[in-house]
Image (cartoon, grey):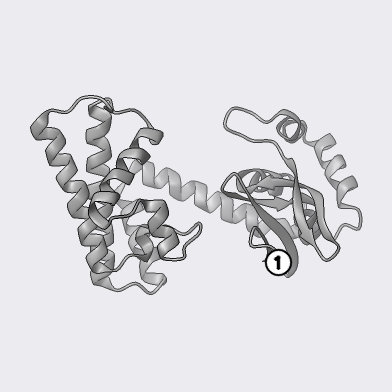
Amino acid sequence: MSKATKIAIFKGKHVRKTIHNNEWWFVINDVIVSLTDSVDPAQYFKKLKTRDKELAKLTDKGEVQFVPPLMLDIETTGGKQKAYCWNTEGIFRLIQSIPSPKAEPFKRWLAKVGYERVQEIEDPELATKRTRALYKAKGYSDDWIEKRMRGIQVREQLTNEWKNREVGGDKEYAILTAEISQATFGMTPSQYKKFKNLKRENLRDHMNDLELIFSMLGEASTTEIAKNKNAQGFI
């Protein structure tokens, strides 16, 4: 099986997924079978769209920042085959429309995540606490977590400075970040991920204490240089 296509265990059933445009896309029929035990998932999906007109609109045309499903190549035992797939956001939307007891735990989880997000908007400190708890659950040490959280703050200060100086958007930020990384480590972030044999993982979550310190130093220095030179714009 290719590196691009992997198998995910979804409630005890195999749900195939593949990387497309640098994000996971899941086979819709596999998700439906795993949550409904339907023997004809394609027909089930068709009936589902008949009942849920908004879902039908999303699958046919999408919306602003909402991508419709696509036919993608999926590895099977018989070779590559085209399958109707949707990204994570689309699959979550699909699950909301499935009237099955098996889908209920996912719906409750989505409701919980939404509620926590609202809480974090009202009290941003909660987001920091949840991030710390997540790193702790993954087995990171307290010292590492402290540096990682401080690094997030330093990064935010830098991007806020860029924003105030009308540097541009995400594309310009990525270019400048690559320059900082090149000066700090002799590698761009993409080269550094290859060096560490990472794919979609967060690079900084796989840095040691010294790497985190040097990353903070590079970005904090850039912030100060921008202030002292009163730099304006991307160039």
Q: Is residue 49 above or below residue 13?
A: above
Residue 197 position, x and y percent, is 46, 65
Quickly name the residue at label 1: 11
Q: Quadrant of residue 64?
A: top right
Q: Residues within 10 Å of mark 1 (few under 14, many from 20)?
A: few
Q: Quadrant of residue 118?
A: top left
Classify the position of the N terminus by image quarter.
bottom right
Q: Residue furthest front?
A: 186
Label 1 secondary element? loop
Q: Quadrant of residue 56?
A: top right
Q: Nearer the viewer, residue 226 or 110?
A: 226
Residue 123 position, x and y percent, is 32, 45
Seen at 70% across and 66% down, the residue is 11
Q: Is residue 3 above or below residue 233?
A: below
Q: Residue furthest left?
A: 228
Amino acid under label 1?
Lys
Decide if residue 123 is in sight here: no
Direction from residue 59 to residue 44 in the image, left or right: right
Q: Is residue 208 above or below residue 65?
A: below
Direction from residue 165 to residue 228 in the image, left or right: left
Seen at 62% across and 48% down, the residue is 88
Direction from residue 97 to residue 149 in the image, left or right: left
Q: Is residue 49 above or below residue 209?
A: above
Q: Nearer the viewer, residue 76 or 109?
A: 76
Decide if residue 116 is in sight here: yes
Total labels drawn: 1
